[in-house]
Image (spheres, grey):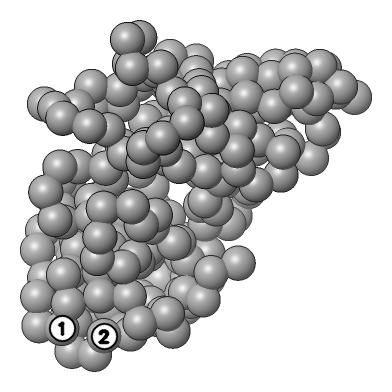
Amino acid sequence: EADIYQTPRYLVIGTGKKITLECSQTMGHDKMYWYQQDPGMELHLIHYSYGVNSTEKGDLSSESTVSRIRTEHFPLTLESARPSHTSQYLCASNLAGLSYEQYFGPGTRLTVT
Amino acid sequence: AQSVAQPEDQVNVAEGNPLTVKCTYSVSGNPYLFWYVQYPNRGLQFLLKYITGDNLVKGSYGFEAEFNKSQTSFHLKKPSALVSDSALYFCAVRVSGNTGKLIFGQGTTLQVKP
């Protein structure tokens, strides 16, 4: 198992609430990623970061935002949760370089009622 | 455009039989290819990768994959399937450039029956 952690693992929350999904890694990886995994199980990249103070939007448009103030920490925030945000959110990281695979956290399953 | 395709939504095999999960890719330049496995309510676990060198790559849990440049394929294989191999499998290709981004296939559910 890789040293990448996500909290909470499961979250049920009402519409309109602000939420932050936490992701931390202790491997010193400079690159980090957030994926959304829909019920059909496909993975969609929603945010990524090259390093501290660097964030980019991914291939799938998302209403969430991210920050990277510390190398090991890459939280994702939804200002106002909606039922359409119900999904599994996976965080991943890797080292710079062509040959390095991404390591994934266990995921956060979010349900917005 | 770079892409990955897993043509089978589900693969069913009997325990003890060989298994193959198919993956084809489309990239410009040399491909960097990966296989991941996902068990229920878990994140993805890295199985193996092809970067360069021998076309047959060995990975975790007895899995291997064969890189075929002419057919642009990277099929995952195991000589003898176990019931515990039942899971969701993803093939991925690294996007060219320095982002480290991966493009994933849609996933294939492997069902191994006793």
Dot 1 amino acid type = Val
Q: Residue A107 in the image: x percent, y percent?
A: 47, 63
**B80 left or right of A102?**
right
Dot 2 amino acid type = Thr
- Residue A41: image quadrant is top left
Task: Please say if B69 is above or below A55.
Answer: above
Q: Which residue is mark 2?
A: A71
Q: Residue furthest right?
A: B114
Q: Are marks 1 and 2 in contact (CB under 8 Å)?
A: yes
Give the letter of the chain under mark 2.
A
Q: Which residue is mark 1?
A: A52
**B65 left or right of A25?**
right
Residue at 37% of width from left, 30% of height from top? B105
- Residue A40: image quadrant is top left
Q: Residue furthest top?
A: B71
Q: Quadrant of the C terminus of chain A?
A: bottom left
Residue at 86% of width from left, 22% of height from top? B16
Give the letter of the chain under mark 1.
A
Query: Which is nearer the eye, B101 or B73?
Result: B73
Marks counted in the figure total 2
Q: Residue B38 in the image: x percent, y percent?
A: 57, 46
